[in-house]
Structure formats: C-alpha cells, structure tokens
Amino acid sequence: MGRRVIPELIARGHRVRALVRQGSEGKLPPGCEPVVGNALDEATFASRVAPADTFLQLVGVAHPSPAKAAEFRSVDFASARASARAATAGGVSHFVYVSVAQPAPVMKAYVEARAEGEAAIRAAGLNATFVRPWYVLGPGHRWPYLFLPVYRLLQLLPPTRDTARRLYPVTLEQMVAALVTAVEEPAAGIRIVETPEIRRAKLSV
C-alpha cells in the first residue's frame, strides 16, 4: 500500500520520509527520504520523526490469516505501539493508522491486535484517524470479487445489512484516496473512517 500512497503524496507536494529496513532503501519511490530502522523499536527511528505534522502507520503482517495470530501481536500491535511513542516524542500533531473493520465474526486475533493498536494511539493522546477496511482488493488480492454479489445481497437483508456494509471489500484506489484525504484533512481528536466512507473516497484535484 505504501508503494501507492507515497508517490501520490509526493505528487501532491508533500515531503515524505519512510521507515525501511537496512538494505531496502532502493525500494522506495523517487523523492522519498529513507529512515533506516526497526518498526518494532521506536528507539531506532524516533529521533528521525521530527519535523513532521503527520505520521502514517502502514506496518502489519502480510496476508493475514488465523494461523498468524502470534504475529499479529508481535508485529501489528508492537509496531503500532512503537509508532505512537515515536510520533509523540517527535511532536506529531496527527496520526493516521490503517486498522481493520470491527467488530467482525472472524479473524478474532487480528481484530484484537488492531484494536489494541488503536488503544495505544488513544493512550498516547494523539489526534488520530483510524481507517478501518476489512479487505483491500488489488494485485494478487482479487479473488474476493467473486463474493461481491453475496455482499450486495446481504446488504439488502436487515439482519445482515450492517455487517455486510462494514465488511464489504474496498479497492486499493479507494484506500489510497482515503489515506491521502486523512493526511490532508487532519482530525481533531479521534476520527474513524469505516468501509462505506472509504468506498466514497476520491482525491481532490
């Protein structure tokens, strides 16, 4: 997701620095300044956060599945907590966090880890936007298109309408638009962007 969001932010005139592992600096888009560090340890990158007005947190386990429950706590939650601490130390005024739709009937450990990440950000006292998709459609992640007719049907039935709307897949383009909008329209307090709002997101010219 970062590979799509970063170029868009740079094209819109934002100065972007991105946290990367040692040796991965060359993977960043042109115009992005690398910050080498460990996303799980704020001591390795907190000193490089300032000056900044927004911290965008995209770190998480790739291809989440129930088998990765332990990783959700050791990576997703741990990185959110470290990022919140680094953002606070760096004087960041707005934190944007890619969380997950909740509540949800499946992937309990994943939802819990992301909810705890949100709690850590709240506890840090940061103004924050929590963007809560359930599944992002994009390259290599297109099989859920087959289930979209089922989602549409479930939205028509009162008992399942709210859940179907909350868990409806969003496209990568919609997520990029939602994240850029969150950066450019910072929240005062806590703002939660659910799936219906993500699906309506469009970039202003």
Image (cartoon, rainbow, N blue to C red):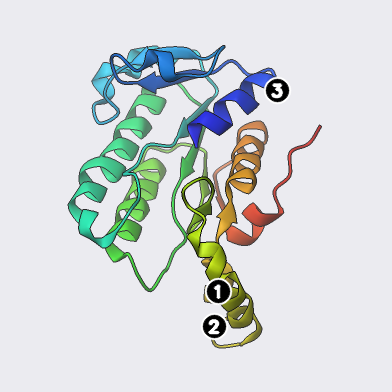
Q: Is residue 100 above or below residue 90?
A: below
Residue beneath disc 3 = 12
Q: Residue 64, percent across and down?
A: 33, 53
Q: Residue at x 67, y 36 (%)?
A: 185
At a point 59% along the width and 15% down the height, the residue shown is 15
Q: Quadrant of residue 103?
A: bottom left
Question: Of helix, strand and loop, which one carries label 1?
Answer: helix
Pointer 1 residue: 164
Res 197 quadrant in image: bottom right
The residue at the far left in this view is 70
Residue corresponding to mark 2: 160
User: Mark 1 packing: few (<14 Cα in 10 Å), some, or many (20+)?
Assistant: some
Q: Give the x, y percent position of residue 27.
A: 43, 19
Q: Secondary structure at mark 3?
A: loop
- Is residue 67 left or right of 171 when viewed as pictured? left
Q: Say if mark 1 contacts mark 2, CB within 8 Å.
A: yes
User: The residue under label 2 is which amino acid type?
Assistant: Thr
For label 2, count other residues whose C-alpha is less than 10 Å away and answer few (under 14), some (14-19) or many (20+): few
The reply, left or right, for residue 192 in relation to residue 22 is right
User: Who is closer to the viewer here, 6 or 90?
Assistant: 6
